[in-house]
Amino acid sequence: MQSGVKHEVIDNWFERIVKRHCKGQVEMFRYCDDVVICCQYQSDAERVKEALDKRLAKFGLALNKEKTRLVQFSKAKSRQKIKQEAFDFLGFTFYLGRSRKGDLIPKVKTNGARLRKKLKSVNVWAREVRNKAPLKEIWKAFGQKLEGHIQYYGVSFNARSVHNFRNKAIRTMFKWLNRRSQRKSFNWEEFELFMSRYPAPKARICHVLF
C-alpha cells in the first residue's frame, strides 16, 4: 500500500494500534511523506487501508488517491500463477524477478518516469550552462551530478539502468558542449579523447541488496 501522508499522524498509531490488530505480520517503510505498508495477508491490507483513511480524516488529511493502491507482491502467490504487480517508491520500481539461480526474488530498477525526468533536467542544465563557464568547470560539475545519480540509483539489479542513464547523459552533454560557438567544438572522437583525460564517473553498484 502506497501513500503520501504526514508521518507524525501515523507512526505511533501504526506501532501501538495497527500491529496489534492484524492477523499477520505488517511493517511500514517511510521516507518523508511517502509510505509503503507491507502486509502478510490481503485481508489485513484492506483493513489497514480503510483504517488509515479514517485516521487521516481526523486530522483533516486524506489519502492521495492516485498514489494509494493495494499491490499483490508475493513470491508464494507467484507460484500459484497469480498476476503480480510492480510498485514505485522513492524513484525506484519494485518488482519480482528471477535470480541467476532461477529463484524468484524482489528486484528494483529506476522508475521510468523518474529516469526521463532526470534526463530532461540534464538537457536543460547543459543548455543553460554551456556558455557560462570554462569547459573543464562545466565537465567537473556534470561529473558531480552524475556521481550523485550513480550513488543513489547504483543498487543491485539496476546496473543496466544506471549505465544507460550515464551514456545518454554524456551524449546530451556532447550535444550542448558542441554548441558553445557557431563552429562545432569537437567531433565524437575528440570528445572521447577529452573524456579519457577527464573521465566521467563509471556506472557501478554502490549498494548491494542481497
Image: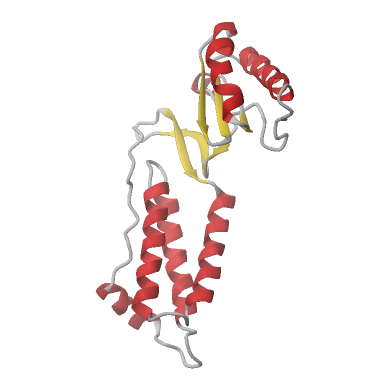
User: Left or right: 115 with respect to 66?
Assistant: left
User: Left or right: 14 with respect to 162?
Assistant: right
Using the rendered view, name the quadrant where residue 198 is placed. Answer: bottom left
- Farthest left residue? 197
Quadrant, the N terminus: top right
Q: Position of residue 142 (x, y in %)?
A: 40, 67
Q: Residue at x 42, y 46 (%)?
A: 158
Q: Position of residue 64 (x, y in %)?
A: 70, 35
Q: Residue at x 44, y 58 (%)?
A: 164
Count of numbered marks? 0
Give the image's coloring scheme: secondary structure
Using the rendered view, name the quadrant where residue 13 is placed. Answer: top right
From the viewer's side, name the closer residue of 29 and 105.
29
Q: Could one spot residue 81 in this view of the protein? A: no
Q: Position of residue 81 (x, y in %)?
A: 58, 23
Quadrant, the C terminus: top left
